[in-house]
Image (tube, rainbow, N blue to C red):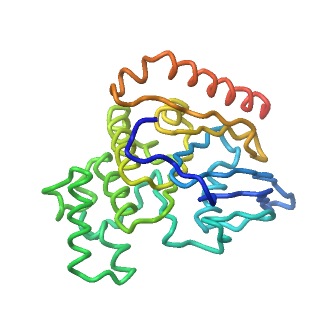
C-alpha cells in the first residue's frame, strides 16, 4: 500500500474477544452478533462486509460506545470501552449535521465541546475547510449543500478534533456513484496523511477492497468474522488503473464470493 503512513505494531488499536450481543423482543431472544474476535493495529484501514442483518453496524455501535455488549470484551488502545469518547469519531450515512449551524460551526462543534481556545479553534477549522476543499462555503448551512459537500463536512468535523480511531457506518451509501467515488478518494487521501485507525462498515465490496488494507467478511447472523483478506494495492497510478488491475479484480472476486457464501448460508 502506498502512502505517507505505515500501520504500526504494538498494542492493538481495537481488540475484540468473544464479543456477543443479543436483543430481547416479543418474548424471544435474537442473537445478533458474535462471538467476534478481531484485532486491528494502529493505523490500519479495515472494512467489514457481509450479508444484510449480520451485525456489522451493531459491532460498530458497540465500539462507538452507543450499545453495550452482552458478553466478551472490547478494548480501544488497551482500555475497555464504557461509553462514547473523544478517542473515537463516528461518521454516519445520514451526515448527522446540525441544520441550524453553518459549515464552519458544524466543524467547530466538537472543539467547542472540548473547550478549545477560540484562536486555536478558528485555525483548526480553517485548516479543515481547506483540507476538504470547501473554501468559500464557511457560512453556508447544510440545506445549501450537496450530498457530497455534507459528507465532507461530516468527515472534517470528525477529523478536526483528532480522534485516534475513525468509525464509518456506510458513510457514502446515500451518494450518487460519481460523488461516492470522489469521496472515497478524499477519504483515502485523508487516511494516508493522518495515519489514523479506520474501521468502516459497508455493503459495497468494491469500496471495501479499493479503500482498505484489510477486508473482513462477517457471517450471517449471529455475525462473526469468518474470513480476512489482506489488501496491498498500489494507488499511485490512480483510480482507473487500480480498478482495472488484475490484483484488484482477483481480490474483489474473492471477497465477493466470500460474502455470497455467507448470504447463501443465511437463506
| Place of residue 219 in the rendered image (x, y in percent of width and height, measured from the top left) | 74, 39
- Residue 91 versus residue 85 in the image, above or below: above
Q: Toward the viewer: 114 or 204?
A: 114
Q: What residue lies at 35% left-to-right and 22% top-to-bottom?
A: 240
Q: Toward the viewer: 34 or 87?
A: 87
Q: What residue lies at 41% left-to-right and 49% top-to-bottom?
A: 191
Q: What residue lies at 43% left-to-right and 22% top-to-bottom?
A: 243
For residue 72, say whether it is visible.
yes
- Residue 1 versus residue 26 in the image, above or below: above
- Res. 29 image quadrant: bottom right
| Place of residue 249 in the rendered image (x, y in percent of width and height, measured from the top left) | 52, 19
Horizontal arrangement in the rendering, residue 88 relative to residue 79 (left or right): left
For residue 51, say whether it is visible.
no
- Residue 263 versus residue 62 in the image, above or below: above
Count of numbered badges drawn on the protein: 0
Horizontal arrangement in the rendering, residue 113 relative to residue 129 (left or right): right
Q: Toward the viewer: 11 or 57?
A: 11
| Place of residue 142 in the rendered image (x, y in percent of width and height, measured from the top left) | 28, 59
Horizontal arrangement in the rendering, residue 18 relative to residue 165 (left or right): right
Query: Image quadrant for the C terminus?
Result: top right
Q: What residue lies at 18% left-to-right and 62% top-to-bottom?
A: 138
- Res. 16 image quadrant: bottom right
- Tell which residue pokes out farthest to the left in this image: 136
| Place of residue 46 in the rendered image (x, y in percent of width and height, measured from the top left) | 56, 45
Amino acid at each position: 500500500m502506498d502512502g505517507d503512513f505505515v500501520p504500526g505494531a504494538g498494542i492493538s488499536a481495537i481488540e475484540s474477544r468473544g464479543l456477543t450481543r443479543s436483543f430481547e423482543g416479543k418474548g424471544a431472544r435474537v442473537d445478533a452478533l458474535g462471538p467476534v474476535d478481531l484485532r486491528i493495529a494502529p493505523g490500519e484501514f479495515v472494512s467489514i462486509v457481509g450479508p444484510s442483518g449480520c451485525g456489522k453496524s451493531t459491532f460498530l455501535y458497540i465500539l462507538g460506545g452507543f450499545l453495550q455488549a452482552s458478553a466478551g470484551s472490547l478494548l480501544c488502545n488497551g482500555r475497555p470501552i464504557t461509553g462514547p469518547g473523544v478517542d473515537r469519531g463516528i461518521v454516519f450515512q445520514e451526515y448527522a449535521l446540525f441544520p441550524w449551524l453553518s459549515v464552519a460551526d458544524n466543524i467547530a462543534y466538537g472543539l467547542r465541546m472540548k473547550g478549545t481556545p477560540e484562536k486555536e479553534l478558528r485555525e483548526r477549522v480553517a485548516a479543515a475547510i481547506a483540507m476538504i476543499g470547501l473554501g468559500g462555503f464557511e457560512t453556508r448551512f447544510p440545506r445549501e449543500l450537496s450530498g457530497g459537500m455534507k459528507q465532507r463536512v461530516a468527515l472534517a468535523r470528525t477529523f478536526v478534533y483528532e480522534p485516534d480511531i475513525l468509525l464509518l457506518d456506510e458513510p457514502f451509501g446515500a451518494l450518487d456513484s460519481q460523488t461516492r467515488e470522489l469521496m472515497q478518494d478524499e477519504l483515502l487521501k485523508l487516511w494516508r496523511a493522518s495515519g489514523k485507525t479506520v474501521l468502516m462498515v459497508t455493503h459495497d465490496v468494491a469500496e471495501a477492497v479499493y479503500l482498505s488494507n484489510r477486508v473482513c467478511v462477517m457471517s450471517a447472523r449471529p455475525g462473526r468474522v469468518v474470513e480476512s483478506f489482506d489488501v496491498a494495492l498500489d494507488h499511485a497510478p490512480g483510480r482507473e488503473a487500480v480498478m482495472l488491475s488484475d490484483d484488484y479484480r482477483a481480490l474483489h472476486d474473492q471477497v465477493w464470493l466470500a460474502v455470497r457464501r455467507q448470504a447463501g448460508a443465511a437463506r
